[in-house]
Image (cartoon, rainbow, N blue to C red):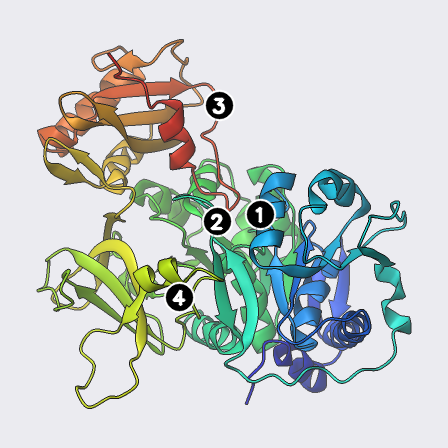
Amino acid sequence: MTTLISELIFQRALITPEAPALREANQDFSYRALASELRHTANFLLHHGLARNERVAVYMEKRVDTVVALFGAAAAGGVFVPVNPLLKPEQVAHILKDCNVRILVTTPERFELLRPVLASCHDLRAVVICGAAMPATLDGVTMVNWAERPSAPDAIPHRAIDGDMAAILYTSGSTGRPKGVVLSHRNLVAGAESVAQYLENHADDRILCVLPLSFDYGLSQLTTAFRVGACAVLMNYLFPRDVIRAVEREKITGLAAVPPLWVQLAQLDWPASVNAHLRYITNSGGAMPTATLAALRAKLPKMKPYLMYGLTEAFRSTYLPPEEVDQRPESMGKAIPNAEIMVVREDGTPCAPGEPGELVHRGVHVALGYWNDAEKTAERYKPAPGQASGLTITELAVWSGDTVKMDEEGFFYFIGRRDEMIKTSGYRVSPTEVEEVVYATELVAEVAAIGVAHPVLGQAVVLVVYAESASPSPQPSPLGGEGVMEKLLAACKQQLPAFMVPAQIVMRDAPLPRNPNGKIDRKALGVEWADLFAQ
C-alpha cells in the first residue's frame, strides 16, 4: 500500500522500471531513472542540513529537474513548496518568508532576479543552482550546484508517515496575500488514487502537463500519472496553438486546462488525427462555458469531457461523468470517490434540493490547514456537519465559501464564490451566471463580470470583454452602443432578470489579465475599474 507521495515513483520503478515517467523536449525519462534521481536528491538535501519537515522551495519553469526537486524533497522527509515561475521577486520572497523556507532550488537567471529580496528571507540557509553558471555568493547563504547531487553520501531519510506534511501550495491570492495550504502525504496520495479511478487512468496514458505545478490541479497531472505508471509530458507553452500541436505530436491521451485556456482552444482548428488518441479532457478552476464545451465536443467527438470542481484546501471535490454531460452540462457533478460533499445553511443544517447553500467537503482529501495562520484556518476548517454526538474527537471539514445547490438526484451546481458575488440593488448576483449568457453569444473571446461600487445600486454589474474581431472603445462604453455591445446587451436582457443586466460594458483590445494560475484576475479588473461610477 502506498502511503508516501514519493513511493508512487519508487513502486513504479520496481514494477515497470523502463516505462517513461516524464517527457521533456522530445526526451523520455524512465521510472528507474526518476527513482534514482530522487534518491540522489534526498541524499543531497539531507547532506546540506535539511531537517525533518523543513521546507524546500522550487522556483523554476516546468522541467524534469523541477519534478525531481519537488519529489526528492518529500523523499528526504522534507516539505516541498512549488513556486509559480510567473511570480515576481517580491511575491516569491513573501512565500519564502511566510513558510520559513530553508533551501531554495532555482536557476542562475532567476537567482539574480531574487538576489535583492533574499536578504529578507532570514530562514534561508542554502540556495541550489540548477544550471552551468554559478552566481556570486550571498551573505549568510550556502551556494551549491545541482550537478553535485550524485556525489552526495548516502543518508537515511527522516521518518515520515502518511499524516505528515508533504507540500505547501500557495493560493492565487485572489482575496488577499497568498495563503499556504498544507497538504499531507495522505492528501496527495488519496487525491491521486481518487482522480485516477474516475478518469480510468492506466499505464498507457500520456498526460500533457500545461498547468503550473504550483497549482494543485497542475500538480495532480503528475501524481495521477505516477499513480498508474503513465507518462507525464512537461510543457511550458507560449500560445494555445502550441498546446494543440503538442497533443498531436506527443499522442496525448489526457489534457487538463482551466476555462480561459479552453475558451481559446475551442476557437482553434484541431487536426482530425487527435481523435485517434485524445481519450479525455478535464476542466477545473471555474465553470467551462457551455458554448465552449459544445465547440470542443464538435471538434473532438471521441474524447470524454470531465467537468470538475475543486479547491486547494481539499484538492478535488466533484466531477461530472461524461455520460451525464448531455443531460446536465451545467452541473459540476457528484462527489469524487472517498469524499462526502454537503450543501448546508449558515447553521450547518442541510439544504433542501434546489436551495442554495455553502459547499462543505469532508474526507481524506481535507488539507491540514493554512501554514502559520490559525485565524484563517479556523475560518475555513470547521467541524463537519452531522457528526455523531458521542464522538470525543471532532472531525474537521472544509467550508468552501462557495455557494452551490444540489438537485433531487444529488448533482451539484455552482452558483458563485462568496467573495466574488456581486451585491446589487439588494440582490446577490453570480458572475458566472452572467458570463455564461455572454459566452453563449459567441461574440467575445473572453469575459468577466465584476461588481463595481455604485452610488445608488451598491454595486453595479460591469462586463469586461475581449472580442478579437471587435474594435475596442477608447473609453468605458455605456449600454446601448452599436455592434457587439448592442448584441451582448440584447442577450442579457433576454435571458437575465433586470437586476443582473450589466450597467456598463468595457471593451478591451487585449486578453483579460490572468493570475499566476492562469485564471482571469477578477481582483485586478476590480481595481482597474473601481472608480468607474465615482462622482
Give the residue at mark 1: 94
Q: Is 284 on the left-hand or right-hand side of 45?
A: left
Q: Earlier in the sequence, mark 1 or mark 2?
A: 1
Q: Residue at x 33, y 14 (%)?
A: 476
Give the residue at mark 2: 178
Q: Residue at x 54, y 78 (%)?
A: 164
Q: Viewer-nearest of labels 2 and 3?
A: 2
| x and y percentages locating residue 501 in the rendered image | 17, 27
Q: Is label 1 in contact with label 2 (beta carbons under 8 Å)?
A: yes
Q: Quadrant of residue 530?
A: top left
Query: Which residue type does callout 2 highlight?
Result: Pro
Give the residue at mark 3: 510
Q: Earlier in the sequence, mark 4 or mark 2?
A: 2
Q: Is the N terminus in the top left, top right, bottom left or bottom right quadrant?
A: bottom right
- Find the distance from the CA under tag 3 to the CA under tag 4: 34 Å
- Find the distance from the CA under tag 4 to the CA under tag 1: 23 Å
Q: Earlier in the sequence, mark 3 or mark 4?
A: 4
Query: Which residue type does callout 4 highlight?
Result: Ala
SS for dot 3: loop
SS for dot 2: loop
Q: Note whether 37 is above or below 489 in the view shown.
A: below
